[in-house]
Image (tube, helix red, strand yellow):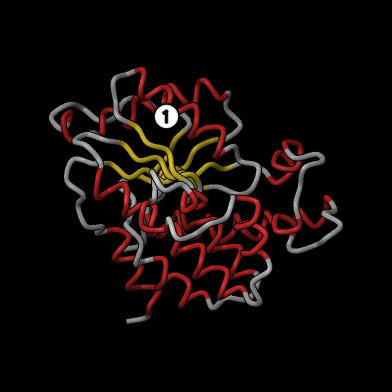
């Protein structure tokens, strides 16, 4: 069996994490993942749900990731150091390590019925580094070692809408390593990323979200969906009416 096929099976049969929900927010650059996870954390807390927001750079926060307190650097330094790594494989392994460590740290210490919202998680970065030269099967095999999400929300927008959201704050990493950050480079790179995400969404059964919807509408709908999925609500109906979500069909 190919490594990618084993990864798909592992994705679909993730190990249970008790009463803690790990939620992954996936999507291309400019999809609004960071804005949404911050607003979603606040909305869940207002509903009385213990919600924690994470991203890969929390390795520099000793409270969120105690095991990485040996890293004595700020986020801009870590970001630039990662970009300076000599190969896509090196970058991806470091990125996945940071995600594995931060997610595992919170899963290990989370309270009952806690929701962990992981901004971006492995999906977009794995796609990007495959585009930059990392081996796809090896990359997916490495990603399969991370704690697997209970729910993955995949935010979909046309590439042109992504560009409109980032008119003058694009970086080379988002533009296929084009230092000039030209719009055409951004569009082409994001379309390639979305081709991988679309494929993985189909294979792994992610919930696809129309990312063009107003932020408050997204927050209201997703917070209700997440709250209904908590183990304490397992006897309730979990279909809470999400008109702009669809669950991608998984491969047999």
Mark 1 Cα shell of 10 Å, populated few (<14), some (14-19), many (≥20): many
For residue 250, above or below residue 92: above
Give residue 12's quadrant in the image: bottom left
Which residue is nearer to you in this view: 23 or 156? 23
Which residue carries the number 1 mark? 41
For residue 31, above or below residue 129: above
Q: Name the quadrant of the N terminus.
A: bottom left
In this rendering, position of residue 218 left or right of residue 108: right
Q: Name the quadrant of the C terminus.
A: bottom left
Which residue is nearer to you in this view: 78 or 73? 73
**Residue depicted at x 56% and y 74%:** 90
Residue 185 in the image: state x and y as whole percent. Answer: 80, 57
Residue 154 in the image: state x and y as whole percent. Answer: 48, 45
Residue 6 in the image: state x and y as whole percent. Answer: 32, 73
**Residue depicted at x 67% and y 55%:** 191
Callout 1 secondary element = helix
In this rendering, position of residue 197 left or right of residue 112: right
**Residue depicted at x 52% and y 51%:** 57
Outermost residue toward the left?
235
Residue 201 in the image: state x and y as whole percent. Answer: 45, 54
């Amino acid at each position: 069996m190919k490594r990618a096929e084993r990864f798909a099976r592992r994705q679909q049969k993730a190990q249970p994490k008790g009463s803690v929900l790990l939620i992954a927010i996936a999507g291309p650059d400019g999809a609004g993942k960071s804005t949404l996870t911050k607003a979603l954390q606040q909305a869940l807390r207002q509903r009385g749900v213990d919600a924690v927001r994470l991203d890969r750079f929390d390795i520099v926060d000793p409270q969120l990731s105690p095991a990485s307190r040996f890293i004595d650097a700020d986020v801009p330094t870590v970001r630039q150091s990662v970009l300076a790594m000599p190969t896509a494989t090196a970058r991806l392994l470091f990125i996945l390590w940071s995600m594995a460590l931060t997610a595992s740290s919170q899963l290990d210490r989370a309270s009952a019925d806690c929701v962990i919202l992981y901004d971006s998680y492995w999906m977009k970065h794995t796609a990007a580094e495959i585009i930059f030269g990392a081996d796809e099967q090896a990359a997916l095999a490495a990603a399969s070692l991370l704690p697997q999400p209970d729910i993955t929300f995949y935010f979909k927008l046309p590439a042109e809408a992504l560009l409109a959201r980032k008119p003058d704050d694009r970086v080379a990493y988002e533009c296929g390593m084009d230092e000039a950050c030209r719009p055409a480079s951004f569009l082409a790179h994001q379309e390639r990323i979305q081709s991988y995400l679309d494929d993985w969404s189909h294979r792994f059964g992610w919930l696809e979200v129309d990312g063009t919807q107003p932020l408050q509408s997204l927050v209201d709908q997703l917070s209700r969906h997440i709250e209904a999925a908590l183990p304490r609500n397992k006897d309730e109906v979990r279909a809470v009416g999400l008109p702009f979500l669809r669950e991608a069909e998984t491969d047999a």
